[in-house]
Amino acid sequence: MTKHEPDTERLLNRAQDGDDAARRQLLTRHRVRLRQMVAVRLDRRMAARLDPSDVIQEALMEAHAKLGDYLQERPVEFYPWLRAIAWQRLLKFQRRHLHARKRSVLREEPQILPLPDESATQLADRLAGKGASPSDHAARSELRLRVQEALARLSESDRELLVLRYLEQMPLKEIACVLETTEGAVKTRHVRALQRLHDWLSQGNTEDKS
């Protein structure tokens, strides 16, 4: 968003007053963020048959139909609301193409999709840190593998929180909306997840030296 574009809150107010242009802008301004969310979660076995744009297009059409009701109540922040629609669309696409378990995709509690290997590698890279020189390539590759192993040992809920924070790059306030909890709880869980990750890595160092 450039400094000349209205922020989301102003667009919401304009849309509520009947501004159709504001409604259209609301539904398209977060397209890149939605695409990132879908790309991170999309099972690579589906890559040849499903483009993230397909999921996003259907989600935006559904959001357009529901926007009037949302504007009347505004039950949550706008992007988490829009993301939830795209999330449900992605779940349905995954079930349709991969014949996943028959458990309902409409239950109220948050649902967690398996993280594709490529996204797990990307998350490990983010958590391992940046700035390694070319001469440190071997050491960095080893660190990435160790982070991946440590991530695999975390609970699904801890790993999901880290995905939201470091791959989807969501602020804590939005993560709290997605996880249906408070921002304070998210901060605490975030710190604890990183501490558990650090503990697993430290344990691995100890075992290597023994």
Image (cartoon, helix red, strand yellow):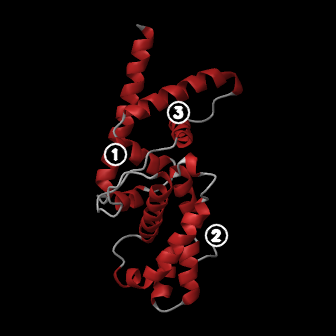
Instruction: Identify the secondary structure beneath mark 3.
Output: helix
The first of marks 2 and 3 along the sequence is 2
Quadrant in the picture for residue 68:
bottom left
Residue that carries the numbered disc 2 in the rendered image: 2
Residue type marked 2: Thr
Q: Amino acid at mark 1?
A: Ser
Regarding residue 193, the answer to whether it shows in the image is yes
Q: Residue at x 43, y 17 (%)?
A: 205
Q: Pointer 2: residues within 10 angstroms few (<14), some, or many (20+)? A: few
Tag 3 residue:
128
* Residue drawn 39% across the image and 80% down it: 70
Quadrant where the N terminus is found in the figure: bottom right
Coordinates of residue 42 in the picture (x, y in percent): 53, 52
CA–CA distance in space, label 1 to label 3? 20 Å
Query: Which of marks 3 and 1 precedes in the sequence?
Result: 3
Quadrant (top left, top right, bottom left, bottom right) of the C terminus: top left
Q: Can you tell which quarter of the image residue 27 is in?
A: bottom right
Q: Is residue 200 left or right of residue 89?
A: left
Q: State the separation of the CA atoms marked 2 and 3.
A: 31 Å
Q: Residue furthest bottom?
A: 18
Mark 1 highlights which residue?
157
Please tell me how many numbered marks the rendered image carries. Answer: 3
Relative placement, left or right, of 173 versus 31 is left
- C-alpha distance separating marks 2 and 1: 35 Å
In the image, which disc is placed on residue 195? none
